[in-house]
Image (cartoon, rainbow, N blue to C red):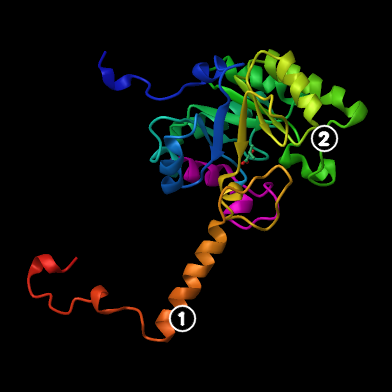
């Protein structure tokens, strides 16, 4: 067999082995240029269904389709060589039955070249996780605040407070036992995230969870200051690219209106030879 079939880059079993090691660095990407920027720095790049809100202006992730995830997944694939690529299964594409979930997961993996899928839910989705993992689909699970259940929760509230903590613990155990290779813990109390991380033997990836998690994930557009519609407490802004972009656009508009752009250096004033026309 030729070497062409070798798997390059980080794999789900590699991530599984990172339990209790150096924290996993994870961010979202939806496009090739952003994937290229992340690849050298991240262990996992998630094509999150947050794409619906961040890039498409939807008010929740519920309107995201399988075709949207596949199109963004294909774009991200072209930008990655090193990081593990995980694609979110969108709302409605995996809840009906394990067989339905498998068909859609296989389509996502086949058409995007991703190595794993992520799906939301705990005990109720554990049977599906078992079905997928037994059939060659590595699964990253996601419990706590699962944004696809926003209507059930009545908003994007912290989950697992007080007596509700036991529900999240049961969810975490159920998806671990079902064979998930890692688990996103979103927006739950810090002590609960710490406990779950100590309790289960797969890496936990926190978002609004705990420093004790085995890794952290953020939406890239949030941490870069590009998505500013709302800002959860768990987001740290590492840049204000939205502000910078707007200042650049305003400067361009002023230059055009004042005929300061284009300047002579942007024009083909003396371009007489073919090679000058670039
Ligand atoms: O859709 C997404 O981007 C996510 C992460 C925030 C975990 O699920």
- Which residue in the protein does label 2 denote? 159
Q: Based on the displayed image, in which of its 4 quarters is residue 278 positioned?
A: bottom left
Q: Residue at x 66, y 50 (%)?
A: 63
Label 2 CB less than 8 angstroms from ligand 1: no
Q: Secondary structure at mark 1?
A: helix
Residue at far right of view: 163
- Counting labels gives 2
Residue 133 in view: yes
Q: Based on the displayed image, in which of its 4 quarters is residue 126 positioned?
A: top right
Does the magenta-highlighted stretch encompass residue 65? yes
Asked whether disc 2 touches disc 1, contact meaning CB atoms under 8 Å apart, the reply is no
Left or right of 128 in this view: 134: left
- Which residue in the protein does label 1 denote? 254
- Segment tinted magenta in the rendering: 51-74
Residue 88 image point, x, y percent: 59, 36
Q: Residue at x 84, y 30 (%)?
A: 160
Dot 2 or dot 1, earlier in sequence: 2
């Amino acid at each position: 067999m030729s070497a062409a079939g070798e798997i390059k880059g980080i794999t789900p079993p590699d991530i599984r082995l990172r339990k209790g090691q150096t924290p996993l660095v994870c961010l979202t990407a939806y496009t090739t240029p952003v994937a290229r920027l992340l690849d050298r720095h991240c262990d996992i790049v998630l094509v999150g269904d947050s794409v619906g809100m961040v890039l498409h202006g939807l008010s929740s992730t519920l309107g995201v389709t399988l075709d949207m995830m596949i199109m963004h997944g294909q774009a991200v694939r072209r930008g990655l060589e090193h990081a593990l690529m995980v694609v979110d299964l969108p709302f409605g594409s995996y809840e009906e039955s394990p067989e339905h979930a498998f068909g859609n997961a296989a389509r996502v993996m086949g058409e995007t070249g991703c190595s794993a899928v992520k799906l939301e839910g705990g005990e109720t989705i554990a049977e599906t996780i078992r079905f997928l993992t037994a059939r060659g689909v590595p699964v990253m699970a996601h419990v706590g605040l699962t944004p696809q259940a926003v209507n059930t929760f009545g908003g994007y509230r912290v989950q697992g407070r007080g007596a509700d903590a036991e529900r999240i613990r049961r969810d975490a155990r159920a998806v671990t036992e079902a064979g998930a290779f890692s688990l996103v813990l979103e927006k739950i109390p810090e002590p609960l995230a710490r406990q779950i991380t100590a309790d289960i033997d797969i890496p936990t990836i926190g978002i609004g969870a705990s420093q004790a998690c085995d890794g952290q994930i953020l939406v890239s557009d949030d941490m870069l200051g590009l998505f500013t519609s709302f800002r959860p407490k768990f987001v740290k802004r590492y840049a204000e690219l939205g502000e910078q972009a707007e200042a650049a656009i305003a400067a361009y508009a002023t230059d055009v209106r004042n005929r300061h752009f284009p300047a002579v250096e942007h024009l083909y004033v003396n371009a007489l030879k073919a090679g000058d026309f670039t």
